[in-house]
Every structure is written in structure tokens, then in C-alpha cells.
Image (tube, coloured by chain):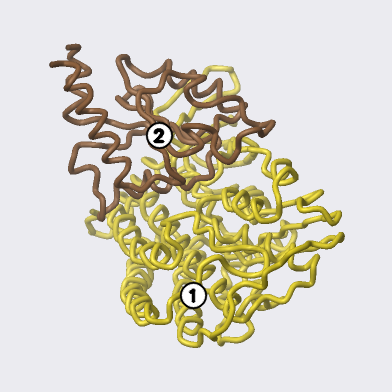
Chain colours: A brown, B yellow
Amino acid sequence: MNWKLYSLLKSPWVFHLSTGSCNNCDIEILDFLTPRYDAERFGIQLVGSPRHADILLVTGAMNRKAAPLAKKIYNQMAKPCLVIAFGACGCTQGIFEGSYAVAGTVDSEIPVDLYIPGCPPRPEAIIAGIARLISSIKEKKE
Amino acid sequence: MTKIIPVGPYHPLQEEPEFFQLHVDGENVTDIDITIGYNHRGIEKLSEARTFDQSAFLVERVCGICSTSHPFAFVQAVEDIGKIEVPERALYIRSIVGELERIHSHLLWLGLAGHFLGYNTIWMWAWKCRETVIDILELISGNRQNYAMFKVGGVRRDIDDNDIPHYLKLLDEVVPALNLFRGAVTDDPVIRARLVGVGVLSREEAVSYAAVGPTARASGIAIDVRKDEPYAAYDRIEWEIIVTENGDVYDKVILRVLEMLESVKIARQCLENLPGGEIDANVKEIPPGEGIGRHEAPRGEVLHYVLSDGSNMPVRHKIRAPSFQNVPTNKVAAVGETISDAAIVLAAVDPCYCCTERIAVIDTGGDRRAACGDELIRLSQEKTRRIARRMGREIK
């Protein structure tokens, strides 16, 4: 297995990108860093630059203005990297389906590895999602 | 020589992606340009294709943090069209949810403000305390965010009278934490040195920019929809508008902490005096006409205008959110400050602003330097540490 993908399993660093969400997902992502959920004890950390990140966490219904930026940010990330579509809007456009301001879904712009549905998903769901992603990579390795 | 620092538009801490261009001369901000529109989802247009009941869910997703404020204003606008009488119990439940949301929103802001200043302990404490409030909301509504409590003519879920003592107990747990924050902000000389006299918005400027909510109240303007035009249960209980005079960031912090204590008071009174009866007026039809709904959201006045032609969908639905008025006040508040103060000044109006995606420093010669995303927060945190060292203190 690729050494970088292997290092992912130990301490995944996450870059969070909002592409026209209602912020609820974004609050829950911050929430999972704070004392009750404390994701940093698993080595999951939110970083400020896509170049430092292993996982791209995309929220929101892919606004027309955001779609090219999302692609650009994905291209800036060191490969291999993982992409998570977060929340109902990230997975399927959710309630904003059919809006003139929405360009497509997250997976129509960039390849997605994991979907975490919910409006918004609970902080536990993020931890569970990332844990599942890691175990699926491990299974592939074996 | 003037340099331009573009900040934004994307950041996890921002409620709405906004794009600031700071014009700087040396370390001082001389001008600021603000661009919004990065988070446009066409909600007003979508609302025209939804029934009145469905639109309440849609406007909840205008802003996740104000996810009660928008349905609150929207259902009042629709009730204004039909002149619908809402049952007393529903009015009280609306106020309870509205005030709990204010506490959680202000705590969220307080935590982020602490983070910008380099006090990560405040961030963690505030968000830990916020979980208690979210727990009450979850017990009442069934969801941590997006409560879906509001419908035209009432509320969707009742509060069980047997649960009220438990809610009151949880509310009591919040009060000592809030007093702790009040003490932490007023007693700490470093926070005073960072915030007093920084990002001042004078009374006249607040009026000319039509600032609303805490931004206006911190500048000495006693404006609050809950008092000016009482709705829900706000005229049936005792509470006061919190006003501070100086308009600087320090006053905005103190004002929000005091407002949370006032919100606890309101929620407590509503829970204790919750009247019995129905929670829903069972509205069947919305007549043709137009209506306006106003609600004092955590950030200021939210206004919804709804036009109906007698069908089951709005013909026109106009939303005006408070940040739309408050964000331009940065133009006067941030100008004249140093770059290291910019993060907290721009955050003080509570668009939870800062920048992770990128900061590019551009000089007029066209040379462009892309700096790491957290630059602005780093500058701000370094300044706090500098001041703390001068005072012989250690910041954790």
C-alpha cells in the first residue's frame, strides 16, 4: 500500500470546504473538535490549508460560484487523498435541489469516497464515518 | 504604499462566505471592500415552488445557526396575511426555542472570538457549555440543529409538562458558566487591553449604516424587535434590553454575555408559566394578501415579506437577514485598526469571519504572495501573547 494512504490511517488531517451550505454541517464539524466529542484524541485534526490535508470534507449543495473553487482545492491536495460528501446537501443537494444557483452534486465535480447523510449529521456520525473509511482502506490492504 | 489583502471567501468558521479586501498601509487598515454572494442558494425563488408548510423547512436552512429565527419570522409573516390567532401555549414554546437558540448562538460566537484572540480555553469552555443548551433543544425538538418546531398557526411539537423540571435544571447549569465568562472577560487585563477602544462603531455611524441587533445595541441604540413590536410571549414576561454605550469590541462581548443571562431569564419564565391548551390553530387556507414577519434573531432583526394570491404557495417571499446590514459597518469599524486587530473586529459583528482558504498579499506592483490560510488568526493571537508578556502573564 501507498505510504501516504497508510499514514492516513493513523492521523487523518481534515480540510473543510463549504460550497454553499446552511452552516449547520459546518458548526457540527467544529463541534466534533470540542470537549464532548474531542476528535483530536483520535488524531483527527482540522487544518487550514488543503495542501496539508488528507481528507477533504465537503458540505453544501455545490453553488455555481463554488464549483470551480472546489475543483481547484481538490487539485491542490496531495494525492492520494480522500473526499467525504457531508450532509444531505453534500450527498444529494438536499432541500436545494432544483435551485438555479446550484451547479451539481459534490460527486459530479470531484470523486467522493464516503457519504455522510443527515441534516445535519451528528458529530458522532463524522467520527463513525471516518472510522469506517479507515477500516475499509485496511480491508482493501488485506 | 497601500497594499490590498483579500480575505476569504471560504472559511469553516464563517456563517456566510464573505470576501473582504483589506487595504493596508504598513500595519494599518486604511480601507475595506466587502463582497457577498458566495453562498447564494436561491432560497427566495425555491420558496415560490413550495407550499407554506414546506417553506418553513426551507427557510430553516437559510442559516444553520439562526435555524429558528427564519421560520419564526416566516410563520409570523404568513399569520399576518391570514390574521391567524396562534394558541397561547404555542407562543410560549416559540419564545423558549427562540431564546435557547440565542444562548447557543452567542456561546458559539464567544468561543470563536476567544479563538481569534488566542484564548483557546475560552473556545473549548464556551462550546462545552453550549452542548448543554443543545441538549435541551434536542430534548424539546428531537434534533440538535434545524429544530423544525415552527408551522403556520403554531408549533409542531409540544413540551411535556413532566419534563419541564429537567429543562430548568439544565438551564441552571448554564448560568454558572455564563457568570464565569463574564468574570473572565471583565477581570482579564489582557482581554481589556486587546478589546477596549478597538473597532469602535459610534452611535451616529450605527444609525447611518442601519445596524441592527447586538451591533447596534453595543453602540448605545436600544433597538430590539422583541420590545419594540412584541410578538410571541415576549410581552407576557419580564425582561430588559441590554445596551452598552461605547461600541467597541469589548462592549460587544459584554453585551452578548449579558444577553445570554437575560435569555436564560426569559426561557425560565416561559417554562415556568407555560399555559395549557392547544399548540396548533389548524390553519386550512391562506387568503390573498401580503404580510410581514419580524423576529429578533441572535444577530439582529430578521424580516420576512410574503405575498400570497390565495393558493397554497407564496407568490413572492423576500428575506432580509441581519448580517446584510451589520457586515457593511466593518467599513467604519475596521478602518484605522491594525491587521492583527482586523480578525476580531470583523468577527465582532458576528459573521464569524476570518480566513482559512487563502490570504494573498498583493502590492500595487502586481507582486502576489499567497500566505498560509490562518495568517490573520496567527497575527491576532501573536498580538495577545505580546500584550500578555508585557503584563507578565502566560496565555494558554
Indicate the chain on which mark 2 is placed: A
| Secondary structure of residue under mark 2 | strand
Q: Secondary structure at mark 1?
A: helix
Whether label 2 touches label 1, CB < 8 Å: no
- Observer-nearest residue: B21 or B146? B146
Q: Quadrant of the N terminus of chain B?
A: top right
Q: Residues within 10 Å of mark 2 (few under 14, many from 20)?
A: many
How crowded pointer 1 is (Cα within 10 Å; few <14, some 14-19, many 20+) is rated as many
Using the numbered discs, state the Cα–Cα distance from disc 2 to disc 1 in whole angstroms. 32 Å
In the rendered image, residue B52, in percent from the top left (x then y), is placed at 70, 55
Locate residue B202 relative to residue B254 in the image: left or right: right
Residue type (three-letter) at the residue carrying disc 1: Ser
Please identify the quarter of the rendering in which residue B231 is found: bottom right
Query: Residue B255: which disc?
Result: none
Q: Residue B287 at what x, y percent from top left?
A: 84, 62
Measuring 37% from the left and 19% from the top, which residue is drawn there? A77
Q: Position of residue A25 (x, y in %)?
A: 44, 44
Q: Quick one: B49 or A19, which is closer to the camera?
A: B49
Residue B184 drawn above or below residue B63: below
Residue that extends furthest to the left in the rendered view of this protein: A142
Number of marks in picture: 2
Which of the chains bears the disc numbered 1? B
Residue at 37% x, 55% y: name it: B114
List the residue tagged with mark 1: B263
- Determine the image quadrant of residue A101: top right
Q: Is residue A105 above or below residue B137?
A: above
Decide which of B173, B197 is in the foreground and name it.
B173
- Which residue is under mark 2? A16
Q: Position of residue B117 (x, y in %)?
A: 37, 52
Q: Would residue B3 be visible to someone looking at this image?
A: no
Q: Is residue A66 left or right of residue B172?
A: right
